[in-house]
Amino acid sequence: MTGRARVEVDFVAPRHLAGGGDPAWITVPLHRAAEWSYGNDPLMPRVILSSPGQKALLRLEPVTDGQWWTLHHAPDAGRPAWYATFGGRTPVEAIAGFTDALTHPHTAPATSEPYIPLLAQGWRPSRDRNGLSSPDGFAHIEHFTNADSWFMTAGIGEDPEGQLWQARFDGTTPLPLIAAFTRALADPTPLARDLLGLSPLVRPHAQVTVREIPAAQRAFALERRIQKLSSAAPPPDAAPHAPSPRHRTR
């Protein structure tokens, strides 16, 4: 393959309809750029990664119609333990925004308000419930103050069969991390995807464009991502985010 070789790639927007993508976008940088260790059980279809100081544990375990990704963080710096979970069709780029902000705090957005990145991309208050909805109405985020948790969903219609994915954040999850997730999710840049993995429910509603790009750009995207994180890598278990103020539902 020469440096001039080009390939056709499908790009999907909006991101909440793009599907999960390659889990390596999250797991490999955690291991190589943030020094998380991993356990390997060849008899189980799962990945377990732990931070250098053993404060955080990420589990990736394919579960039919369940949450594939679960991150648990131990208490520290005046903050109780917290967790976050993500469904299998949650775009890995959005989850990576969350994990990058955890391991490399300089990547977190300037705002710690999760709604701000969404409002900037046209999300608006829902008509029939609290929180915000995406411009196409297929994604929704809400902060439940009574249960002190954040809940985000994407789906085609209200029927359970149309649900695409869910993301759940414990109420004590650092708000800058949630804001990093919403910023990455709201980013209007389309995501490269294999259309064979796109849900049939999504295809009539997603915007798909085919672009011809350098083959090297496609092949080395993950490596460039790792190098970018590694070039400014903080010490293992970087200083935790300061406790966030309580947030009120809109």
Image: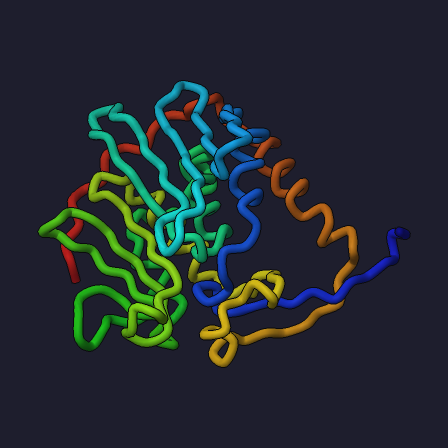
The answer to whether residue 50 is seen in the rendering is yes
Residue at (62% x, 63% y) in the render: 194
Is 116 rendered above or below residue 237?
below
Query: From this viewpoint, which residue is outermost toward the bottom?
Result: 204
Q: How is the image coloured?
A: rainbow
- Give x and y (percent) for residue 149: 20, 48
Q: Is residue 126 above or below residue 166?
A: below
Q: Outermost residue, top direction? A: 53
Q: Which image quarter: residue 137?
A: bottom left
For this orientation, the residue located farthest to the front is 43
Outermost residue, right direction?
2
Q: Is residue 239 left or right of residue 221?
A: left
The answer to which image quadrant residue 143 occupies is bottom left
Q: Position of residue 210 (x, y in %)?
A: 68, 72
Q: Position of residue 73 (x, y in %)?
A: 31, 31
**Could you tell me residue 219's position as x and y percent?**
73, 49
Q: Residue drawn at (55%, 30%), measured in percent from left and top? A: 42
Q: Quadrant of the C terminus?
A: bottom left
Work out whether residue 226 or residue 74 is closer to the camera in this orientation and state it: 74
Residue 109: tell me if it is visible. Answer: no
**Above or below for 81 versus 198:** above
Residue beneath the point at 38% across and 59% down: 165
How many labels sit on residues?
A: 0
Foreground pick, 181 / 48? 48
In the image: residue 43, left or right of residue 61: right
